[in-house]
Amino acid sequence: MADPTGAVWRKSTRSGNGGNCVEVATNLLNSQGVVFVRDSKNPQGGLIAVTAAGWTAFTSSLRDGTLAQ
């Protein structure tokens, strides 16, 4: 099971001030093989752990525009 202890959270520099953002923690990727994702409006409300392959697929689909809205 992935452990978010020690996660360093960050938001995209492209995030506005609207509050509809996610935060990611990639600093534990090498040690645990996951990227943690949480809602910036409710950081105590839970998080998900995404595998390295899943994160790569997600971010690639954002870049190339293939992610369905």
Image (cartoon, rainbow, N blue to C red):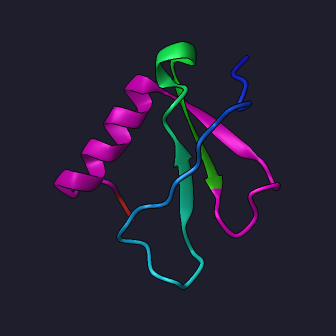
Residue drawn 29% across the image and 54% down it? 62
- Residue 25 position, x and y percent, is 55, 41
Q: Is residue 55 left or right of residue 22?
A: left
Residue at 35% across / 71% down in the picture? 14
Task: Using residue 26 as the reference point, say whether residue 63 is left or right of it.
Answer: left
Image position, residue 63 (x, y; %): 22, 53
Could you tell me residue 26's position as x and y percent?
48, 36
Asked if 38 appears above or below 69 in the picture, the reply is: above
- In this orientation, does residue 67 appear? yes
Is 1 on the left or on the right of 57, as rendered?
right
Residue at position x 33%, y 34% from top?
Answer: 56
In this rendering, position of residue 35 left or right of residue 63? right
Residue at (32% x, 54% y) in the render: 67
Relative to 24, does residue 68 appear above or below in the rendering? below
Q: Residue 20 in magenta?
A: no
The part of the chain drawn in magenta is 39-67
Up the image or down, 65 lies above or below 1; here it is below
Quarter that holds the C terminus: bottom left
On the image, the x and y values in percent for residue 47 come to 70, 44
54 inside magenta stretch: yes
Q: Nearer the viewer, residue 28 or 39?
A: 28
Most extreme residue toward the right, as rendered?
44
Residue 66: in sight, yes or no?
Answer: no
Counting the numbered discs, the total is 0
Quarter of the picture containing the N terminus is top right
User: 67 and 45: which one is in front?
Assistant: 45
Farthest residue in the left direction? 64
